[in-house]
Amino acid sequence: MYRIITRRMIVPNLHEFTVEAPLVSAAARPGNFVILRPDETGERVPLTVADWDSEAGTVTSIFLQVGASTAKLARLRPGDTIPTFAGPLGKDAEIGKFGTVLCIGGCYGIGSIYPVARALHQAGNKVYALLEGRSRYLLYWQDRFREVSDGVIELTRDGSAGYKGHINRLPEILSLEKIQPDRIIVNGCTFLMMRASNVTRPLGIKTIVNMNPIMIDGTGMCGVCRLTVAGKTKFACVDGPDFDGHEVDWEEFLARRRTYNPEEIQPLRKSGCASHY
Amino acid sequence: MPKQEPFERVRNFDEVALGYTSELAREEAARCLACKKPRCVEGCPVGIDIPAFIQHLHEGDFPGGIRKIKERNALPAVCGRVCPQEEQCEKVCVLGKKHEPVAVGRLERFLADWEAASGAVEKPDAAPPNGRKVAVVGSGPAGITVASDLAVLGYDVSIFEALHEAGGVLTYGIPEFRLPKAIVQREVEYVKSLGVKLCLDFIVGKTRTVDALLKEFDAIFLGTGAGLPWFLEIPGENLNGVYSANEYLTRCNLMKGFRFPAYRTPLKRASRVAVFGGGNVAMDSARTALRLGADEVHIVYRRSRSELPARLEEVENAEEEGVIFDYLTLPTRLLGNGEGWLTEIECLKMELGEPDESGRRRPVPVKGSEFRMSVDAAVCAIGNSPNPLIGMTTPGLSLGKKGNVVADEETGRTSREKIWAGGDVVTGAATVISAMGAARKAAKSIHETLSR
């Protein structure tokens, strides 16, 4: 049983929670994820590690409330326990001296890219953070990013903060900001990562994406997380979750992500509260 | 052997074989000829003294019978159910030459179940703690056996299991209708009652590496099995509705997806399912698909019935339950609709040519025999190999071509001094009894080494 230390909604529908998991926090590295279950009948859910404190033995993660399992997580209170919190899983993010790195985060990806940005900064790179969202009230952790980067750029659909528009504006933003990244890393929903990769391909900038397929075990046992990268099948849980965004078969990935939409939406159609279903 | 009726049992996940009553058991035991040179003992991978236990049973001495079995077999309730006896003890039974062989497996199962039901499971007298610590990686048959053997010898044993429930393939792979999870739980509880610590959610190689553990433990046993699924590598394999057997069975067995939405892991209930493969995993997948409500379930196998590697009883059970066997058929392509969902498989008919390295006749395509089959789910049950994680994170550990850990057949020693291994991680996907046998040998070797 793993104890919840804190759990709070930081922006609408995005929650930050900290769990007591000393074995995981001792071994966590940027880019790793954990597999957890909200309760004994729950499904196994992957969440990327956003931060950890190996002295306190805690791990922090950001999740979006979107279905039954995350609805249960969204109601956890300090002192509650969850039955499963396994990790750290996945290949560590590649941290090296690349020069200038742009870290793009959207939604839960803002949280998951934070430790990567921090490690790249510590490794001596010039790091820029681009936080993307529909509106300013959905952006968070800007102060954290300011501490580990040479600049934080905001991009909102409605223009309420920073640049107005979609990630398609990236090449323009890079030129306006006079940033010439040697590498771009994108964490967030599939559309953000796909669109970012599409606009960086003609620029020839290496773009690393953090894939988020459906998972069950997370250890390479079942293959549900498989995707096609450069024509070959890879398992996101053991070969990834980071891959080259220009090599991913996005169409296939999007289709695979939709596999259980009917089952996930089912509880949201009931009259009662989704977390009690 | 009393069994649930086929048309009833495809509607539930309850155990198919109902087990002998003590009358039936003693009747069957009476058939044993008590051969002077018992061939059955040679046929058993761990050399159980079969005529002796059968004699105890025959005399009504059930405790004596189960004690005799447990001298060699740590998991009789499991092996009695899942051993391919027709390839082992029962294959060489003298009675089997002209009649049915003695039903050794069913008798073993009877005694194991009797002992559990009687509530008087004998616990061996454990040696006093000797201050030495052993780490066991994996809580499947090999890991459980090493742990219990060493705990009895006074070692401080910890099992590290990546999943949230122990048992390994006994829990996630073999369905409830073949091996009730209550039995697996019983074996796990037994091991814990010997003082063994069970650490779940611990992925050795990620949470801590083998070398990090060796700073705390005097020896490590790797029993991580063969959990990496093989895919056919044909076009369309990533369409929605295509599963590895591991995924299909794990959703159902471990995550209890057949009880969705009470258990929240979703599980699609397809109506026309094709299962590729001919082993126990394929049979389990096909029979699971039936129980999930499929109208038609096909086993698509590239050789013929006599080459099927599955346990004979499971093939017969599958046939009785209405699984359609498409022999001499090879899937070549998986086709979908425009939205990424599987709708058809394209297959080629085969004929049997010369034998290959496994000794089985090689399937050869029949030119021009392509045909298509409408399906909405396909399960790939063509085999597994060991998970590469431990190999990748343990320097100096010799691995074979398929990622298996190289280990001595008699001792389980690997190329690294304090590391032993046994079971599927060494041999590739095999049987519970061979994993258990390898585990016993490794435990003995670990004890001999640490005692010096």
Image (cartoon, rainbow, N blue to C red):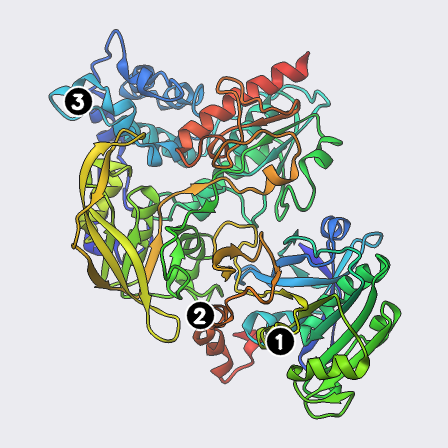
Task: Name the residue that disc number 2 marks.
Answer: A259
Q: Position of residue A9 (x, y in %)?
A: 73, 77
- How busy is the neighbourhood of tag 1: few (under 14 within 10 Å), some, or many (20 plus)? some
Q: Numbered disc 3: what chain? A: B
* Residue at left offset 40%, top offset 29%: B433
User: Where on the picture, by quarter, is residue B218?
Assistant: top right
**Which one is in front, B55 or B367?**
B367
Q: Secondary structure at mark 1?
A: loop
| Marking on residue B96 | 3
Q: What type is the residue that disc 3 sits on? A: Gly
Q: Is residue A208 above or below residue B193?
A: below
Q: Who is closer to the viewer here, A87 or A149?
A: A149
Label 2 and label 1: CA atoms lie apart by: 18 Å
Q: Report whether mark 1 lies on the same chain as mark 3.
A: no
Residue A259 versus residue B333 in the image, above or below:
below
Q: Is residue B191 above or below residue A43?
A: above
Q: Secondary structure at mark 3?
A: helix
Dot 2 alpha-carbon crowd within 10 angstroms: few under 14, some 14 to 19, many 20 or more: some
Same chain check for tags 2 and 3: no
Q: Position of residue A137 (x, y in %)?
A: 75, 86
- The subunit letter for the residue under badge 1 reads A
Measure how far apart labels 1 and 3 are at the Cα level.
62 Å
Residue drawn at x 48%, y 34% is B401
Q: Which mark is residue A97?
A: none
